[in-house]
Amino acid sequence: MEERHIRDKKAIQQLYNDILPQLAQVVHQNLQPVLALFENFTLERLLDTRTKDPADPEKEVSVEQGNVQLLELKLKLEGFNKPGTEPFDLTKDLLFKLHYNYYSVGPDKNTDWLEKDYLQRWQNDELQTIAGQFCDAVIDTLTEKLNK
């Protein structure tokens, strides 16, 4: 049986520098009609260095240490302002939960849309599927806010 790559600096950098930007690009393309409804938007990638490593809570959390627990693609839509509607903002997260020898991707800490081994290549259909699920979640939240 082939041994799985563990979470380390190289694995985290691959996700942060390669996968998150690719996903962000697909999300941006898919959400063009929605983005036009807001005055401003940001789509940024984040890494959580505040959550301590349960294996060693005293150790500094960093990419260099290879112990980051969470990466995130954060979408902020600001200033929905159409006649007859209360102005509002909308925020959505896509979380990469970094476990010891695999990671999972989903909209929150309790929901996984995909699990992958570290350094495993993403296929185009996986990028499209995850970006599509994220965009659907954004549109669902927007629809809920408009129907209030």
Image (tube, helix red, strand yellow):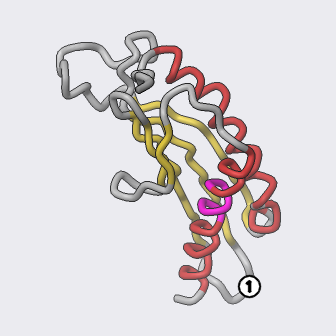
Q: Is residue 76 left or right of residue 70?
A: right
Of 2 and 105, nearer the camera is 2
Q: Secondary structure at mark 1?
A: loop
| Percent coordinates x, y for residue 16 in the rendering | 58, 28
Residue 7: name its quadrant.
top left
> Relative to 103, is 1 above or below?
above
Mark 1, residue position:
83
- Give the farthest residue toward the front: 1
> Magenta stretch containing residue 134, yes or no?
yes
Q: Tell me what residue is drawn at x 71 percent, y 54 percent.
A: 128
Amino acid type for the residue under numbered disc 1: Pro
> Relative to 113, is 60 above or below?
above
Q: Quadrant of the N terminus?
A: top left
> Magenta stretch containing residue 123, yes or no?
no
Q: Main secondary structure of the magenta part?
A: helix
| Percent coordinates x, y for residue 32 in the rendering | 81, 60
| Percent coordinates x, y for residue 41 in the rendering | 69, 53
Q: Tell me what residue is drawn at x 41 percent, y 22 percent.
A: 3
How many numbered marks does the figure carry? Answer: 1
| Percent coordinates x, y for residue 47 in the rendering | 47, 31
> Relative to 84, is 80 above or below?
above
* The magenta segment: 130-135
